Image (tube, rainbow, N blue to C red):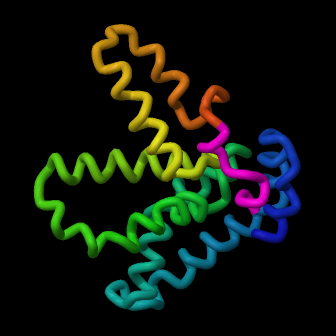
Amino acid sequence: MYKLENSYADLSADERMNKRQLGIKPIVDAFFVWLNSIRDSVPAQSKTGKAITYCLNQESYLREFLNDGNIPIDNNAAERAIRSFCVGKKNWYVIDTIHGAEASAIAYSIAETAKANDLRPYEYFEHLFEVIPQHQEDTDLSFLDDLLPWSPNLPMKCRKSNNENK
Protein backbone atom coordinates (compact mmCIF):
# COMPACT_ATOMS: atom_id res chain seq x y z
CA MET A 1 0.00 0.00 0.00
CA TYR A 2 2.73 2.46 0.92
CA LYS A 3 4.69 1.76 -2.26
CA LEU A 4 1.58 2.57 -4.29
CA GLU A 5 0.77 5.59 -2.11
CA ASN A 6 4.30 6.95 -2.54
CA SER A 7 3.91 6.72 -6.31
CA TYR A 8 0.81 8.97 -6.04
CA ALA A 9 2.62 11.74 -4.14
CA ASP A 10 2.82 14.19 -7.05
CA LEU A 11 -0.79 13.72 -8.20
CA SER A 12 -3.68 16.07 -7.55
CA ALA A 13 -6.08 15.08 -4.78
CA ASP A 14 -8.66 13.82 -7.29
CA GLU A 15 -6.10 11.81 -9.23
CA ARG A 16 -4.72 10.37 -5.98
CA MET A 17 -8.22 9.34 -4.88
CA ASN A 18 -8.86 7.63 -8.22
CA LYS A 19 -5.54 5.77 -8.07
CA ARG A 20 -6.26 4.72 -4.48
CA GLN A 21 -9.62 3.33 -5.56
CA LEU A 22 -7.95 1.24 -8.24
CA GLY A 23 -4.73 0.21 -6.49
CA ILE A 24 -5.13 0.41 -2.73
CA LYS A 25 -8.85 -0.22 -2.15
CA PRO A 26 -8.62 -3.90 -3.22
CA ILE A 27 -5.82 -4.41 -0.68
CA VAL A 28 -7.86 -2.73 2.08
CA ASP A 29 -10.94 -4.77 1.11
CA ALA A 30 -8.91 -7.99 1.28
CA PHE A 31 -7.51 -6.98 4.68
CA PHE A 32 -10.99 -6.54 6.18
CA VAL A 33 -12.24 -9.78 4.60
CA TRP A 34 -9.26 -11.55 6.19
CA LEU A 35 -9.90 -9.93 9.60
CA ASN A 36 -13.52 -11.06 9.52
CA SER A 37 -12.46 -14.58 8.53
CA ILE A 38 -10.08 -14.99 11.50
CA ARG A 39 -12.07 -13.06 14.10
CA ASP A 40 -13.74 -16.13 15.61
CA SER A 41 -10.54 -18.20 15.69
CA VAL A 42 -8.64 -15.69 17.86
CA PRO A 43 -9.46 -15.31 21.56
CA ALA A 44 -11.31 -11.99 21.90
CA GLN A 45 -9.41 -10.95 25.06
CA SER A 46 -5.97 -11.66 23.60
CA LYS A 47 -3.93 -8.73 22.29
CA THR A 48 -4.46 -9.96 18.75
CA GLY A 49 -8.19 -10.37 19.36
CA LYS A 50 -8.42 -6.85 20.75
CA ALA A 51 -6.49 -5.49 17.75
CA ILE A 52 -8.84 -7.29 15.34
CA THR A 53 -11.90 -5.96 17.16
CA TYR A 54 -10.45 -2.45 17.16
CA CYS A 55 -9.74 -2.55 13.41
CA LEU A 56 -13.18 -3.86 12.61
CA ASN A 57 -14.84 -1.26 14.85
CA GLN A 58 -12.81 1.51 13.19
CA GLU A 59 -13.20 0.23 9.63
CA SER A 60 -15.12 3.23 8.29
CA TYR A 61 -12.49 5.61 9.68
CA LEU A 62 -9.57 3.50 8.46
CA ARG A 63 -11.06 3.53 4.94
CA GLU A 64 -11.71 7.29 4.83
CA PHE A 65 -8.43 8.09 3.05
CA LEU A 66 -9.73 6.08 0.07
CA ASN A 67 -12.52 8.62 -0.47
CA ASP A 68 -10.48 11.82 -0.31
CA GLY A 69 -7.10 12.38 -1.90
CA ASN A 70 -6.29 15.11 0.64
CA ILE A 71 -6.44 12.71 3.60
CA PRO A 72 -3.08 11.05 4.26
CA ILE A 73 -2.86 7.26 4.35
CA ASP A 74 -1.81 7.40 8.02
CA ASN A 75 -1.45 9.87 10.88
CA ASN A 76 2.35 9.75 11.07
CA ALA A 77 2.72 13.49 10.48
CA ALA A 78 0.40 14.26 13.40
CA GLU A 79 2.23 11.80 15.63
CA ARG A 80 5.61 13.31 14.72
CA ALA A 81 4.23 16.75 15.53
CA ILE A 82 3.20 15.74 19.06
CA ARG A 83 6.20 13.52 19.82
CA SER A 84 8.12 16.23 21.67
CA PHE A 85 5.02 16.98 23.69
CA CYS A 86 4.60 13.31 24.67
CA VAL A 87 8.28 12.82 25.46
CA GLY A 88 8.21 15.74 27.90
CA LYS A 89 4.98 14.85 29.68
CA LYS A 90 6.72 13.42 32.76
CA ASN A 91 8.24 16.84 33.32
CA TRP A 92 4.81 18.36 33.74
CA TYR A 93 3.70 16.87 37.01
CA VAL A 94 4.28 20.35 38.40
CA ILE A 95 1.39 21.61 36.27
CA ASP A 96 -1.32 20.92 38.77
CA THR A 97 -3.95 23.47 37.80
CA ILE A 98 -6.35 23.83 34.91
CA HIS A 99 -4.82 27.23 34.06
CA GLY A 100 -1.33 25.74 33.98
CA ALA A 101 -2.49 22.93 31.70
CA GLU A 102 -4.26 25.40 29.41
CA ALA A 103 -1.15 27.60 29.25
CA SER A 104 1.01 24.58 28.39
CA ALA A 105 -1.43 23.48 25.69
CA ILE A 106 -1.41 26.96 24.16
CA ALA A 107 2.39 27.17 24.23
CA TYR A 108 2.80 23.75 22.62
CA SER A 109 0.15 24.54 20.00
CA ILE A 110 1.96 27.74 19.06
CA ALA A 111 5.34 25.99 18.95
CA GLU A 112 4.12 23.08 16.81
CA THR A 113 2.22 25.38 14.46
CA ALA A 114 5.38 27.46 14.08
CA LYS A 115 7.36 24.32 13.22
CA ALA A 116 4.69 23.24 10.71
CA ASN A 117 5.08 26.63 9.02
CA ASP A 118 8.90 26.41 8.85
CA LEU A 119 9.50 28.96 11.59
CA ARG A 120 12.06 28.93 14.36
CA PRO A 121 9.86 28.50 17.46
CA TYR A 122 12.18 30.36 19.86
CA GLU A 123 12.51 33.37 17.57
CA TYR A 124 8.79 33.28 16.80
CA PHE A 125 7.89 33.36 20.51
CA GLU A 126 10.42 36.14 21.02
CA HIS A 127 8.74 38.15 18.24
CA LEU A 128 5.29 37.55 19.73
CA PHE A 129 6.49 38.67 23.17
CA GLU A 130 7.97 41.84 21.66
CA VAL A 131 4.97 42.83 19.52
CA ILE A 132 1.88 41.83 21.50
CA PRO A 133 2.64 44.04 24.56
CA GLN A 134 2.84 47.06 22.24
CA HIS A 135 -0.87 46.54 21.42
CA GLN A 136 -2.37 45.89 24.85
CA GLU A 137 -4.51 49.02 24.71
CA ASP A 138 -5.65 48.43 21.11
CA THR A 139 -9.30 47.73 20.42
CA ASP A 140 -8.50 46.88 16.79
CA LEU A 141 -6.96 43.41 16.79
CA SER A 142 -6.09 43.34 13.08
CA PHE A 143 -2.39 43.51 14.04
CA LEU A 144 -2.72 39.83 14.98
CA ASP A 145 -2.98 38.87 11.29
CA ASP A 146 0.67 39.84 10.87
CA LEU A 147 1.62 37.56 13.78
CA LEU A 148 0.07 34.38 12.42
CA PRO A 149 2.70 31.72 11.60
CA TRP A 150 1.84 31.81 7.90
CA SER A 151 1.96 35.60 7.63
CA PRO A 152 4.36 36.88 4.97
CA ASN A 153 4.97 39.88 7.24
CA LEU A 154 6.92 37.98 9.91
CA PRO A 155 10.56 39.04 10.21
CA MET A 156 13.21 36.87 8.56
CA LYS A 157 14.72 36.01 11.96
CA CYS A 158 11.61 33.87 12.58
CA ARG A 159 11.96 31.89 9.36
CA LYS A 160 14.09 28.80 8.96
CA SER A 161 16.79 28.94 6.30
CA ASN A 162 16.73 26.43 3.46
CA ASN A 163 19.49 24.45 5.20
CA GLU A 164 17.39 24.13 8.36
CA ASN A 165 14.41 22.75 6.39
CA LYS A 166 16.33 19.65 5.31
Residue 45 at x, y = what percent?
32, 86
The residue range painted magenta reads 156-166
Identify the residue shown where x is 87% and y is 50%.
10
Task: Describe residue 48's horizontal placement relative to residue 11 as left or right.
Answer: left
Residue, far left: 97
Per the image, is 74 magenta?
no
Q: Is residue 126 above or below residue 1?
A: above
Identify the residue at the far top of this view: 139
The residue shown at (39%, 53%) is 108
Task: Tell me where residue 13 sits by quadrant.
Answer: top right
The reply to whether the magenta stretch includes residue 158 is yes
Q: Is residue 61 visible?
A: yes
Depth order, front residue of 116/33? 116
Left or right: residue 159 versus residue 100 is: right
User: In terms of depth relative to the viewer, which is nearer, 132 or 69?
Assistant: 132
Front residue of 137/79: it is 137
Q: Main secondary structure of the magenta part?
A: loop
Q: Is 153 rendered above or below residue 5?
A: above
Q: Closest to the observer: 10 or 22? A: 10
Report the residue at 56% width, 37% height from top: 149
The quadrant of the picture occupied by the C terminus is bottom right
Locate residue 1, reporting x and y percent: 76, 69
Residue 81 screen position, x and y as percent: 52, 60
Residue at (67, 59) in percent of width and height: 73
Q: Looking at the image, is 142 positioned above or below residue 120?
A: above
